[in-house]
Structure formats: C-alpha cells, structure tokens
Amino acid sequence: MIVWVNGAFGSGKTTLVEELRPRWPEALVFDPETVGYVLREIVDVPTGDFQDLRLWRRQVAELAVGLVEEYRRPLLVPMTLVNPVYLGEIFGALQDEDIFVHHFFLKVAPEVLVRRIDGRSFFPGDPAREERVRNWCKARIEACTDAVDSLPGDTVFLDGGSSPEELADQVLAHVG
C-alpha cells in the first residue's frame, strides 16, 4: 500500500510524513523529488519542472512499485502532484500492479502557503537561488488550489491548518 500525501508547496506534506514515520516504523519513505534531482543531473529539463519529463513519471511509478514489491512494506510518499494527466499516469501504473494508493490532499489557504514558503530556508548562503525557489513554489499555488476539483474521487482532503499530530491521527485512522 502507498500513502500519497499531496498538496501545494508549504502545505505540510513532509512534516506530516515525518510525524507518521515514528508511528509507523515499518513504512518506508519515498520522496519522488529525488528522482527528479537525479534526472536533472543527466538531462535538460526544458520547462524547469521535472514532472514534465515522461521519464520522471515512469521512474516514480516503477520505483514505488519496486519498493512495495521488494520490501513488502507500506510506502509514505510526500509529493505535490496536481496535473491530472501526470497523476493519472502514476496512479494508473500503481493500480495496474495492484498497489492500493491512499491519496491525501492537504488543503491550506493561499495566504498561509505564501507565509510558510517565505518562512522556509531552501538554500542558505545562496540568496539568489533561495529567491528563485520561493518564487517557483509561489507561482504554483494557484494550480495546486485549483486542482482540488480534478483530483481522484477517493482523495481524502485534510485541513492543512491542523497540527501534524492531528493530521497523522486522521491518516492512520483512515488507513487502518
């Protein structure tokens, strides 16, 4: 099984997974961004978003399947994934391998997301890169909030303003 924690940048995906990890020690954590970072070292990403690379989507799905099949452990995946075509590709590939995905989406007001993004440090010591990353994250807020209506019907929406402990309780109760 996979627990996919989705939401805009700054919504608390990683924080929630960090709260779930000690409560669910048998679960593995897989961050698909690492696949994107590897691909960026090898190929050009013309749009600047590695999710636009078909290879990224294939590799994310294949690695998730491999982790679940090889280790027979649940997988916690903190990743923003709001393009319906890309989400369909990845979730479809997982479904084709009979891997059940519990899909959670953290809903957070745009003004809160901006505050959280501004409060994060991405690249200390490199202010220009820091600003580029912040602007990139903020530029995607609207797409993330608009995506709520196009997410799969079984998506569980969580209030991203709740504490990480409360959110973890909700996820664990839902997953059983």
Image (spheres, helix red, strand yellow):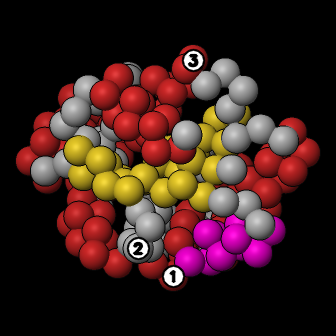
* Residue 102 appears in view: yes
Q: Which element carries disc 2, helix, strand or loop?
A: loop
> In the rendered structure, which amino acid carries the disc numbered 2?
Gly
Pointer 1 residue: 85
Pointer 2 residue: 153
| Residue sitting nearer the eye, 70 or 53 | 70
Q: Which residue is drawn at 71% across and 66% down?
A: 94
N-terminal of the two: label 3 or label 2?
3
Pointer 3 residue: 22
> In the rendered structure, which amino acid carries the disc numbered 1?
Val
Give the residue furthest to the left.
Answer: 111
Q: In this view, does 127 lie above or below 165?
A: below
Gap in angstroms between the C-alphas marked 3 and 2: 29 Å
How many other residues sit within 10 Å of disc 3, few (<14), some (14-19) or many (≥20)? Answer: few
x and y percent of residue 176 in the render? 55, 40
Q: Give the range drawn in magenta.
A: 88-97
Q: Which element carries disc 1, helix, strand or loop?
A: helix
N-terminal of the two: label 1 or label 3?
3
In-image side of 117 versus 57 (left or right) = left
